[in-house]
Amino acid sequence: MPNKVALETLALNNVDIVVSTDNKLFVNNIRQADSVNIDSVDSRVSIEESTETSKVSSIDLRVAAEETIRSTDVDSIDTRVSLEESTEASQVSSIDSRVAAEETARSTEIASIDTRLTNSGSSDSTSIASLDTRVAAEETDRSTDVDSIDTRVSLEESTEAAQVSSIDSRVAAEETGRSNDVDSIDTRVSLEESTEAAQVSSIDSRVAAEETARSTDVDSIDTRLASAGSSDSTSIASLDTRVAAEETARSTDVDSIDTRVSLEESTEAAKIASIDTRMGLEENTTQVATLALTSGAESVEVNFSNDLSMTAFNTTPAVAAMMRNTDANASIIIPMLVGEVSTTGCKFVFSDNIVGNNYKMDIIVTD
């Protein structure tokens, strides 16, 4: 059986084989393989977990903010309801005051009638009859007025009750909507948490697989070193043969890489030529020009050749335009095509009159 020996440096037929303190294999000072960098993996896992925690924290903050907004909306609705009720109570109180004032006025007028009746007590039976008739008519009118006031008060109270009921219905609907929104947010948060948990689990699985693969690589290196340490001169010759074969393979790989690089460069050159061709075709079919607009203009008629220096179109082109202004505070004005576009030109009208001479219109014409 081969013996396993611990050596800092193994020299075989002038070939130095060294395993560094950080588990890297060197042959004649050329690094051959790397061991697992567990610290790097742990760092990535820690960063991933921190990122996931930040995402969950962000979701919690958004949910808290949403709930605060919902609570504020409900408080606002309660405040409006309270104001509506106060207003309704004030209106009812005002109606009661007007009714009381009306009754006081009626009482004063009746007292005045009684006074006039007393003063006319010495009149004859004809005058008394006339007074009785007028008093009866006056009392009938007063009764009708009081009935009318009662009817209006009843209608006012019915209207106010209907309005309060409508407000209660709107409040109930609003609260139901808020509840549905909160439920929707809770559902989205639950889905986000499930997704994050699945991602963390996937990361853990990948880290475990990576650690297993690295461990297998290290065991394979140790096995190869132990076998090499106990080999005889035949093993050394075999090692030389393998080194020579490896060098040949490396040379072949380099030639293969050069070939692939050459093919890749040819492919890229072909792609660039294709892009240039497509850009040339695009330039032949699409033309862009800018037209300066004068203050006060309501519309503009554009001639492709004379106004924009464009080449002629064989068929009716597609036309689009966009307005711009160097002043950030300028009003937004929209250009709109009117009528039919011809092979020689088209007409635009503006959503508002042009103010100032800083407006320019970019016109894109595609054949």
Image (tube, helix red, strand yellow):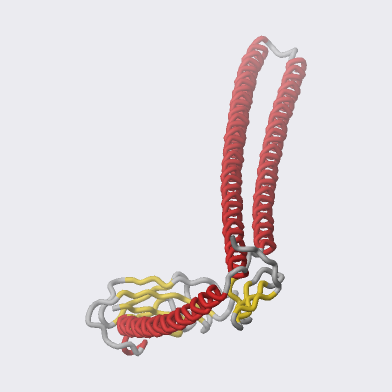
Dividing the picture into quarters, in which one does residue 330 lie? Answer: bottom right
What number of labels is visible? 0
The C terminus, quarter of image: bottom left
Residue 288 visible within the image: no
Is the residue 362 above or below the residue 170 in the image?
below
Residue 186's x, y, as percent?
61, 41
Residue 309's x, y, as percent?
35, 90
- The residue drawn where x is 35% and y is 72% is 337
Is the residue 186 above or below the residue 46 in the image?
above
Dividing the picture into quarters, in which one does residue 179 lie? Answer: top right
Q: Is residue 55 left or right of residue 245?
A: right
Residue 356's x, y, as percent?
53, 81
User: Which residue occupies the extreme left position in the image?
Assistant: 314
- 52 or 61, which is in the foreground? 52
- The residue drawn where x is 37% and y is 82% is 263
- 282 or 16, which is in the foreground? 16
Residue 319's x, y, as percent?
34, 75
Q: Is residue 263 left or right of residue 65?
A: left
- 297 or 69, which is in the foreground? 69
